[in-house]
Amino acid sequence: MSEENKALVRRLIKEVEKGNLDVIDDLLATDFVDRDVLPGQGQDRKGYKRSLSEDRAAFSNLEITIEDQIAEGDKVVTRCRWRGTHDRGKAMGIPPTRKKVEVTAIFIHRVAGGKVKEEWSASDTLERLRPSSAAP
């Protein structure tokens, strides 16, 4: 089951990378909950999809690399690095900086019934977007 859960999370991440957000309806449970949201972001599947759409709209040439993935029981932990240029729109309320951004993120997904039910996340996105931070 762990390998199936890892494959599900990898598919979610790769579809987001491609901009195929419609697949979210197939991969996330109808009662999905995002446990780490920004102010004004909904915790449900609809809010999650809207947030990803806004993020995708803010960056060009988005690339996500999965660096580590561990699964045990119903949880999958993924450490990834994503890169893109913040040149299209606001990200986390910050207007386009035109910077190339590289972010490290860790996600924990809980899988049940072949769908992602919950997500917890941590990243250094805000630190990387601040105008005073150096581009990698």
Image (cartoon, grey):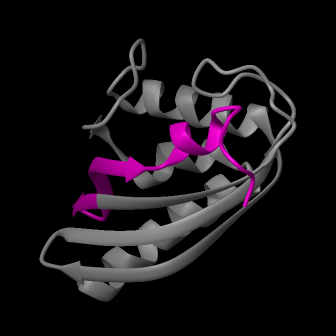
**Quadrant location, the N terminus:** bottom left
The residue closer to the viewer here, 38 or 102, is: 102
Relative to residue 123, is residue 66 drawn left or right?
right
Residue 129 among those drawn in magenta: yes
Q: Residue at x 38, y 61 (%)?
A: 106
Q: Residue at x 86, y 30 (%)?
A: 88
Where 26 sits versus 59, above or below? below
Relative to residue 92, is residue 6 drawn left or right?
left
Where 21 sits versus 62, above or below? above
The residue closer to the viewer here, 99 or 80, is: 99
Q: Residue at x 34, y 50 (%)?
A: 121
Residue 48, percent from left and from top? 46, 33
Q: Which residues are magenta?
A: 109-136
Residue 52, percent from left and from top? 58, 37
Residue 129, percent from left and from top? 65, 37
Relative to residue 42, is residue 98 drawn left or right?
right
Where 98 sits versus 124, above or below? above
Q: Quadrant of residue 95?
A: top right
Q: Residue furthest top?
A: 40
Q: Residue furthest left?
A: 73
Q: Quadrant of residue 13?
A: bottom right
Residue 5 among those drawn in magenta: no
The residue closer to the viewer here, 26 or 55, is: 55
Q: Residue at x 64, y 59 (%)?
A: 15
Please state the total of marks drawn on the protein image: 0
Residue 136, percent from left and from top? 72, 61
